[in-house]
Image (cartoon, grey):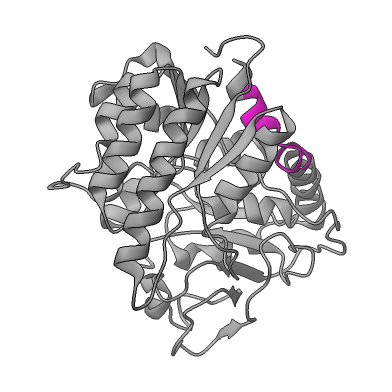
Amino acid sequence: MEQSGKRLLSIQQAQAKALHAGVKAVDDMQSIVEGMGYEGFSVLRRYDGRWSKLLNAIVSWKDLRRLRMELASSGGCLLQWPFYLYDQNVIRTLGRIVAEDGRYTVLLHDVNHLRYGEGYEDRGGEMSLLKGARRVIAHTEPMADYLVGLGVERGKIRVLGPFDYLTDGKKPEGRRNGNEVVFAGNLGKSVFLRELTAELMEGYKLNLYGIGAGNLPAGLEYKGTFQPERVAGIEGSWGLVWDGTSAATCDGMFGRYLSLNCPHKFSLYISAHLPVIIWRGAALAKYVEAKGLGLVVDSLGQIGEEIGRVTDADYERMLESVRAEARELNSGAHLKKALEA
């Protein structure tokens, strides 16, 4: 794809560090490709506050002029998508600059067309950008099929699988077969947590990590926040991958998205050496079963019964598979493979 001998750019939106994993996937991917020889290029910093609209406009257009010049002397670029700004015209212009150059790969973190469902207005030019790319790196085969249905050529698509996840290098120790299940994420958006009852949680406990905890039902223990790269201290035996408003199934738009994407929390749990518990309809469910990385359930009410069947020997086998998977994710193996394919 890229011109030999010329520097390669990896373009991401400039963003601040945070006590949640919202920016970590982008930062990790940037670190991995920079280790492969790409030159990191941050654009479109988003400002908040009184003068935010003016500052965003000034900085964004300066960044776009700089990008056009840098691309002209490069051998191509990797574009981490999507970008989040108040002004979709700015994002569309960024896409147009990259498309005019023509030598670009899109690494998908989210697909806005899929995320926001029917009625989504593609003012940022997402589909035009994906159709014009030399390569598109999608999460899963189902996501690839979805993109083909929207007009992206199948031959352009590479499948990433679970997102790579860089840590501080400290290895979690002392994982034991038990009934403590971890859920990490934006707790305010995880509506299903409010549906949990003592009856549904019979046989297990839930340890929560993240922002937006608010008022939670009895029996859920809030453990606070942590730096996303520091996963060794997470307390529990399992990691839960779930989304939506219901404890019975992953419903609505969130369930549909989970059936096609790779949630970043999956990689967090694996990096913390936690076998996962995942919804059966998730795109990663078959991956979990095939590689022995945890349990697959239809509802949250099944968790107690399912983990009750797991022997210590069963758990140790899962843990061994999880450790092997963590070594892959922590070394950037998935992204390197997708870029080299």
Does residue 293 appear to the left or right of 135 in the view shown?
Answer: right
Q: Residue at x 30, y 22 (%)?
A: 131
Q: Position of residue 17 (x, y in %)?
A: 60, 64
Q: Residue at x 25, y 49 (%)?
A: 88
Q: Which residues are magenta?
A: 327-337
Q: Residue at x 46, y 68 (%)?
A: 301
Q: Is residue 59 above or below residue 225?
A: above
Q: Main secondary structure of the magenta part?
A: helix
Q: Is residue 265 magenta?
A: no
Quarter occupied by residue 288: top right
Does residue 329 appear to the left or right of 16 in the view shown?
Answer: right
In depth, the one of 242 and 32 nearer the eye is: 32
Q: Is residue 334 magenta?
A: yes
> Residue farthest to the left?
119
Q: Residue at x 42, y 66 (%)?
A: 47
Quarter occupied by residue 92: top left
Q: Position of residue 196 (x, y in %)?
A: 43, 78
In depth, the one of 293 and 179 nearer the eye is: 293
Q: Position of residue 219 (x, y in %)?
A: 55, 86
Does residue 198 appear to the left or right of 172 in the view shown?
Answer: left
In depth, the one of 206 and 128 nearer the eye is: 128
Residue 229 visible, this orientation: yes
The quadrant of the picture occupied by the C terminus is top right
Q: Position of residue 112 (x, y in %)?
A: 30, 45
